């Protein structure tokens, strides 16, 4: 049987998963594919470190050139993460005519154009199913199966850490800090959780998904990002009363005027398929003009799930190598206008603490009205206390109008504090 | 730009969808693929019938040979349904070296082997994403993205009509016949609903899914099938009280002893992702040793969703034509043992009407015990009435033991009737 030699860059969580899967299921994969997958060399930072997988001693190396310059290696698998030196190694591998599989969302979100251009110039391919949604097949459906559709919306829960934290906050009515600490102890959140809880990780992934869905370049700095640090149990309780749950959503929409790309906490109706996605699970919801509503659900991270996607990509590369094909599916990355966040429209939930006095609501309503913010519902809580809380849900309103209205409201003497403003997608069933 | 000529066999619901999508999105597809899709000829039964789509008059024909023998046509799309003449046309197209796209689950379930063998012999490919789950990408993930996994379970709601009926019965506490009639009036059920409500349609689709998931031949006659006609509002109410919903599931599992393939109404816990799948929506749940739990959700039927899958397959075929590739992904259909239904194990819900008299439960429990059926819970309803109903949930038990126990119980004088026996998958959260 033929043998395809693979060079692995990195042997952390995902790299170990790739090795384990090839060791466990290599015989079945060889039967299905007609070639044996051979991990010829693995780049590591230290030869001394204890590893989760067993590999022949001479497989490990600290010299990237033993992979990048080895003519026997056809497929280079980059699972190091970060921009450099991942970018440098990927570009060198492509220049050397090798196919590249990567699970690195950051390098794709930041320098994807450079990478795809280099791949096309060298008649090689870049595979990246593992970069978004762990083991969930997302990239291939977007690149291939759904090609017949004009996609209007791609919207998902694509960060497991924040979904775990929000799920626990909802179940236990516990504050953010406490749940985050638990998550860190359980290994569901990093010691420095900022990339997850501030939404950056989701922004990387959204830029990749939106770029495929809308055939567009999505510059990372044009993705609007809000994290979940400000969410309180009171917000979650208000959501529940109104028929919603709060999720950190990554939302991409193509409209006539351009593309919207934003990551922020969102009220979604409890009956929406994404509302049922619990804990570390991820799910991506897609709307196409022909296919209608679709959802893909599964484990969004971890050694074996992400390893499943990476080995799936290796197999795809092997099939193309066997057929001597490259560029079978073209990457379309056109320049399209990105709608600035101020020009996007949403419905909003706003919670504020106010003095309980006649005329307060009139003052606030007038600020909303002057800025074309139309109110769908108001609920007052804690009658007779001081302060009382007011919960508004608005109709569809432009972000910059909302910001202006809130700015005026903050300056009203009777308003103690606007505690939170959260976007609302969809309506609960009545 | 290059042009790929397509011959369409059939212009019913799916065929019209294919034409509409190519007409609406042809420019975008051409940009993405680099070739223009040209519907050269469409086989219809009558040239006079009014059509939902506009096509040049000379495109329609009643002569299949104008498609099957036209050397300019590279791709034949079969959307007629049924076994004959679909089988005959597909085989002729393959023999003529054409690639075939089909959405026909029945022909694949019944004579798939013959078709795949002919394709391999003629170095052409058969594409069938539209045969299961409408527009949901299922076939490509199973054939490609998940190749790294050993799949253990593929389990889903793959018949929209029955899911609509069960959803309505649950929401409205209405009996089967009444809801079926509504569904027929709304066009969600056929005038002759038997293929759907008796589970045959789901069995066709399960044989296709299980064959891909487990690399096996799944003879249709070995798929166990039970429909939903016997489900009553009382069963649905018992399910709710116990923390379950009732769905018609198609279940494929690979065990050490062989493959289980069965279609039957099933209690699934309300927190299971499949439990939230409402109305005509479909969803397929997959478990792999690397990827863990996955679910794919979307519209399982209809002109545009199924059309989306068929046009997606056409595009896949065009990409392979451009690269002059065939057999890129091999079909693995090995002979593997299918576990007879009597040897499969499940937990069971059993509802029976009995005379309310001391000692009744002891008699029934003894029949269960003698056949190794261990009871997880018993609920008696309607105390003091005659008859009262008893609801049992069993632990895991072999089908044939369960059948023997029920046979003995039926013969007890105090037992009026066993009203239903329904399998249970998974346990509710306590």
Image (spheres, coloured by chain):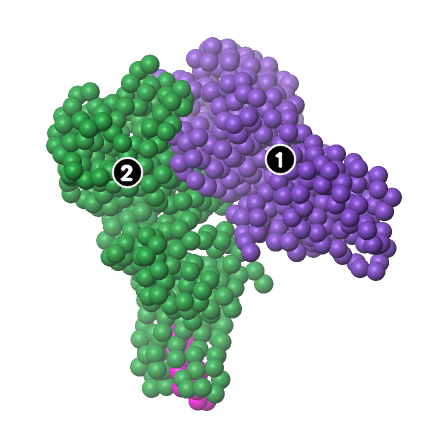
Chain colours: A purple, B green
* Looking at the image, residue A213 lies above or below residue B113: above
Mark 1 falls within which chain? A
Q: Position of residue B158 (x, y in %)?
A: 37, 49
**Residue at position x 17%, y 21% from top?**
B71
Left or right: where B382 falls relative to B105: right
Q: Position of residue B8 (x, y in %)?
A: 23, 32
Q: Is residue A48 visible?
A: yes
Q: Quadrant of residue A42?
A: top right
* Looking at the image, residue B388 lies above or below residue B393: below
Q: Position of residue A395 (x, y in %)?
A: 63, 43
Q: Position of residue B17 (x, y in %)?
A: 32, 37
**Quarter of the picture holding the N terminus of chain B:** top left
Mark 2 falls within which chain? B
Q: Is residue B365 magenta?
A: yes
Say which element carries label 2.
loop
Which region of the structure is painted magenta?
B354-372
Is A59 or B163 nearer to us in this picture? B163
Is A232 or A201 nearer to us in this picture? A232
Is A248 or A354 nearer to us in this picture? A354
Label 1 belongs to which residue?
A345
Label 2 belongs to which residue?
B52
**Residue at position x 36%, y 62% from top?**
B179
């Amino acid at each position: 049987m033929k043998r395809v030699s693979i060079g692995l860059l990195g042997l952390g969580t995902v790299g170990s998963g790739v090795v384990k899967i090839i060791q466990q299921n290599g015989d079945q994969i060889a039967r299905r594919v007609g070639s044996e997958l051979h991990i010829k060399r693995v780049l590591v930072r230290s030869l001394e470190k204890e590893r989760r997988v067993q590999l022949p001693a001479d497989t490990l190396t600290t010299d990237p050139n033993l992979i990048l310059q080895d003519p026997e290696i056809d497929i280079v698998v980059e699972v190091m993460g970060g921009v450099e030196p991942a970018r440098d190694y990927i570009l060198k591998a492509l220049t050397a005519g090798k196919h590249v599989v990567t699970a690195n969302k950051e390098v794709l979100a930041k320098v994807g154009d450079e990478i795809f251009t280099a791949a096309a110039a060298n008649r090689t391919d870049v595979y990246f199913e593992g970069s978004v949604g762990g083991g969930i097949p997302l990239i291939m459906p977007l690149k291939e199966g759904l090609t017949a559709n004009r996609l209007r919306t791609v919207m998902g829960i694509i960060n497991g850490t924040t979904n775990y934290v929000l799920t626990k906050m909802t179940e236990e009515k516990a504050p953010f800090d406490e749940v985050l600490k638990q998550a860190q102890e359980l290994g569901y959140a990093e010691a420095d959780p900022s990339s997850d809880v501030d939404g950056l990780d989701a922004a990387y992934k959204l830029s990749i998904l939106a770029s495929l869905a809308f055939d567009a370049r999505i510059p990372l700095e044009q993705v609007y990002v809000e994290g979940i640090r400000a969410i309180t149990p009171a917000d979650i309780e208000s959501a529940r009363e109104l028929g919603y749950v709060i999720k950190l959503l990554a939302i991409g929409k193509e409209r006539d005027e351009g593309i919207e790309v934003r990551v922020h906490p969102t009220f979604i109706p409890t009956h929406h398929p994404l509302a049922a996605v619990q804990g570390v699970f991820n799910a991506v919801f897609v709307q196409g003009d022909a296919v209608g509503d679709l959802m893909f659900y599964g484990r969004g991270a971890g050694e074996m799930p992400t390893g499943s996607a990476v080995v799936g990509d290796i197999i795809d590369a092997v099939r193309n190598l066997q057929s001597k094909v490259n560029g079978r599916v073209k990457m379309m990355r056109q320049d399209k206008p990105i709608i600035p966040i101020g020009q996007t429209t949403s419905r909003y939930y706003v919670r504020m603490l106010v003095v309980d006095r006649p005329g307060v609501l009139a003052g606030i309503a007038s600020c909303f009205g002057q800025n074309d913010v139309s109110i769908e519902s108001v609920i007052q809580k804690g009658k007779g206390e001081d302060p009382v809380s007011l919960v508004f849900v608005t109709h569809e309103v432009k972000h910059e109008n909302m910001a202006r209205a809130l700015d005026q409201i903050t300056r009203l003497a009777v308003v103690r504090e606007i505690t939170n403003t959260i976007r609302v997608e969809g309506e609960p069933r009545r």
